[in-house]
Amino acid sequence: MKLQITQDDTWVAGIEDRPGGLADKIEALSSAGVNLEFLIARRSPEKPGAGVVFVTPIEGDRQEKVAKEAGFEKSTSMHGLRVTAADQPGLGEQITREIADAGINLRGVSAAAIGSQAVFHLAFDSAQDAEKAMNQLKKIE
């Protein structure tokens, strides 16, 4: 099995927990030509009335400028990998087991199978952990 692995910068913004709060943030990115591959948003239980949105990718000076103006920041505490492969039973277990067996703790995982492809967004606490995980996952054949 062939994995395609790339480093992934995650951008984060606060959102208002109200109808249109998320749409307003995404509209700002769309106006700059951002083509999001990943988006996850959720309420912040510790802050009633607020939420958070995570997106990737934001690429190039123009997109970064608009993202910052819309309240997004490139996360400095979350380091990510994007892993794609042909979907098959057990793929998620194989990827997460390989990382665990290397002694690397995952901060978070989001994954989906779309048609015949599987896409994983893996988050780590440090750039070193992300790099170590990338090298470990490259061993999977």
Image: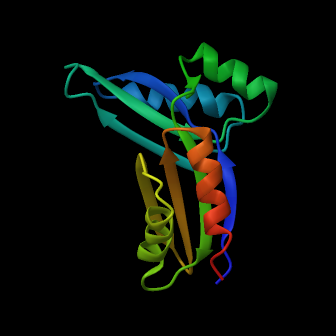
Outermost residue toward the top in this view: 69
Q: Residue at x 46, y 67 (%)?
A: 101
Where residue 103 appears, x then y in whole percent? 46, 58
Eyeballing the image, is 13 above or below 136?
above
Where residue 119 appears, x then y in whole percent? 55, 65
Q: Of 102 and 125, which appears nearest the observer?
A: 102
Q: Residue at x 43, y 63 (%)?
A: 100
Eyeballing the image, is 123 above or below 113?
above
The N terminus, quarter of image: bottom right
Q: Of 140 and 104, which appears nearest the observer?
A: 104
**Tag count in the figure?**
0
Q: Residue at x 62, y 17 (%)?
A: 68
Q: Residue at x 68, y 37 (%)?
A: 34
Outermost residue toward the right in this view: 61
The C terminus, quarter of image: bottom right
Eyeballing the image, is 83 above or below 35?
below
Q: Of 135 and 86, which appears nearest the observer?
A: 135
Where residue 80 appears, x then y in whole percent? 57, 46
Eyeballing the image, is 81 above or below 115?
above
The way the protein has been coloured in the rendering is rainbow
Where residue 18 appears, x then y in whole percent? 28, 24
